[in-house]
Image: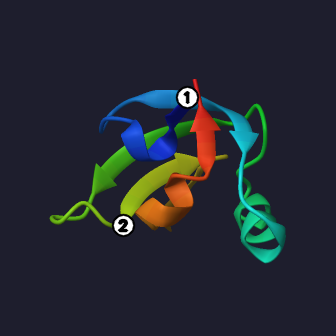
Amino acid sequence: MKTLKDVKIGETVKVVKLHGEGAIRRRIMDMGITKGVEIYLRKAAPLGDPIEITVRGYELSLRKADADMIEVE
């Protein structure tokens, strides 16, 4: 299982499944990260957290803990 946390900078991946429960999962979905959407990893902060992604045409910053809940291919 590969998660968004494991993706290298410059890669484009597709969301397979969202893990997590309740409010956390809802917040990720409200940001536009749903099953089947493509995500491009733009850059990471100097210490690796957070990461900046492009999803549905806009930029978004995500914590590594949240990125670990997003299964990708």
The x, y position of residue 41, in whole percent, is 41, 43
- Asked if residue 24 is positioned above or below residue 18 in the image, the reply reads below
Tag in front: 2 or 1: 1
- Looking at the image, the residue that sits furthest to the left is 46
Q: Which residue is mark 2?
A: 50
Q: How far is mark 2 from mark 1, CA to CA?
A: 21 Å
Query: Would residue 29 appear left or right of 59 to someone viewing this image?
Result: right
Q: Residues within 10 Å of mark 2 (few under 14, many from 20)?
A: some
Image quadrant assignment for residue 24: bottom right
The x, y position of residue 64, in whole percent, is 42, 61
Q: First in sequence: mark 2 or mark 1?
A: 1
Mark 2 and mark 1 residues within 8 Å of each other at the beta carbon? no
Residue 1 marker: 1
Image quadrant assignment for residue 22: bottom right
The x, y position of residue 25, in whole percent, is 76, 63
- Looking at the image, the residue that sits furthest to the top is 73
Q: Which quarter of the figure is the C terminus placed in?
A: top right
Q: Which quarter of the figure is the N terminus placed in?
A: top right
Q: Residues within 10 Å of mark 1 (few under 14, many from 20)?
A: few
Write the residue at 33% across / 33% down. Answer: 10
Q: Which amino acid type corresponds to the residue marked 1 in the rendered image?
A: Met
Query: Would residue 1 appear left or right of 10 to someone viewing this image?
Result: right
For mark 2, give the secondary structure. Answer: loop
For mark 1, give the secondary structure. Answer: loop
- Asked if residue 5 is positioned above or below residue 7 in the image, the reply reads below
Q: Which amino acid type corresponds to the residue marked 2 in the rendered image?
A: Pro
Write the residue at 78% across / 38% down. Answer: 35
Residue 15 marker: none
